[in-house]
Amino acid sequence: MTANSEERLHARTVGETGPRVVFVHGLFGQGKNWTTIAKGLAGGHQVTLLDLPNHGHSPWTERVDYLDMARMVADELESFGEPVTLVGHSMGGKVAMQVALRHPELLRALVVVDIAPTEYPVSGGRTEDPDEEASPFAAFIAAMRELDLGSLRTREDADAALRSVVPSRMVRSFLLQSLVREGPGDGGGWRWRLNLELLERDLGALRGFPDPPPGARFDGPVLWIAGANSHYVLPEDRERMEELYPSTRLVRIKNAGHWVHSEQPEVFLETLKRFLERVER
């Protein structure tokens, strides 16, 4: 639960009219990760970007828990007074799935990006494929925590310090969006907006997927978007997906891994727009 239950998730809305689409980011992310996609939809939608707890501008909590996060997101959705299309990537996809199962009346439709309703290994991969990227998140947290913020001079220095553990420039850039200066000008100290200590402690909990309420399922339209180069959504996940979300359509985007919307933003946006056109008719 939050340290102060009165605190709300930080939200920013782009676009003034049309059906509402709400985006939930993944681990280490924040709502602004979706800005490019949001701008692409804003002509005909109200697009709300949420920061999950312990990320971005949202409050820090005493634990990392999917049901707590789903409850906080549901509170935000309820405040809109109309059903929304909820889009979630990775950890945010699991949060969105839980909202759909526990508060289906709040959703017009669900979009899940490169994650399945299953448990993931804490280390190593899910397949025998030698090219599968082993789960990197514990190493990412360790590298971010080891960064000496007191002696850090520039963001470029931070980027260089992370390079050996985070070889992808795109992923480093994504992580460093949460590194901010305190105080005015270039003289202020640095801090992480991420609650790294808590995320490290509770990382194991984020691997799982809490059991839904007995008999729960979401019957509304569901678009599942996966990266063709990613191993996060495997053929053996399909049965569970369709059991809980029977109106599922799965699309795999070529030349994309786990960060589908960053690696192939134009294809991702077009895929999402077509789905929204269908569900909003």
Image (tube, rainbow, N blue to C red):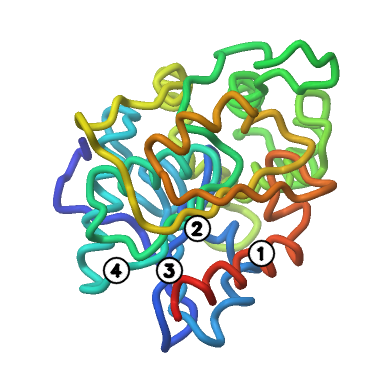
Residue 7, percent across and down? Answer: 21, 53
Q: Residue at x 45, y 44 (%)?
A: 55
Question: Mark 3 to mark 4: distance in Å?
Answer: 13 Å
Q: What residue is disc 3 on? A: 48
Q: What residue is disc 2 on? A: 31
Amino acid tagged 1: Thr
- Contact between marks 4 and 1 (CB within 8 A): the answer is no
Residue 31, percent across and down? Answer: 50, 58
- Contact between marks 3 and 2 (CB within 8 A): the answer is no
Q: Is residue 227 left or right of residue 118?
A: right
Q: Secondary structure at mark 3?
A: strand
Amino acid tagged 3: Thr
Q: What residue is disc 1 on? A: 271
Question: Mark 3 to mark 2: distance in Å?
Answer: 8 Å
Q: Is residue 210 above or below residue 27?
A: above
Which mark is in front, 3 or 2? 3
Which mark is in front, 1 or 2? 1
Residue 207, percent across and down? Answer: 47, 22
Q: Is residue 8 above or below residue 117?
A: below
> Which sits earlier in the primary sequence, circle 2 or circle 4?
2
Q: What residue is disc 4 on? A: 83
Q: Residue at x 22, y 33 (%)?
A: 215
Q: Secondary structure at mark 1?
A: helix
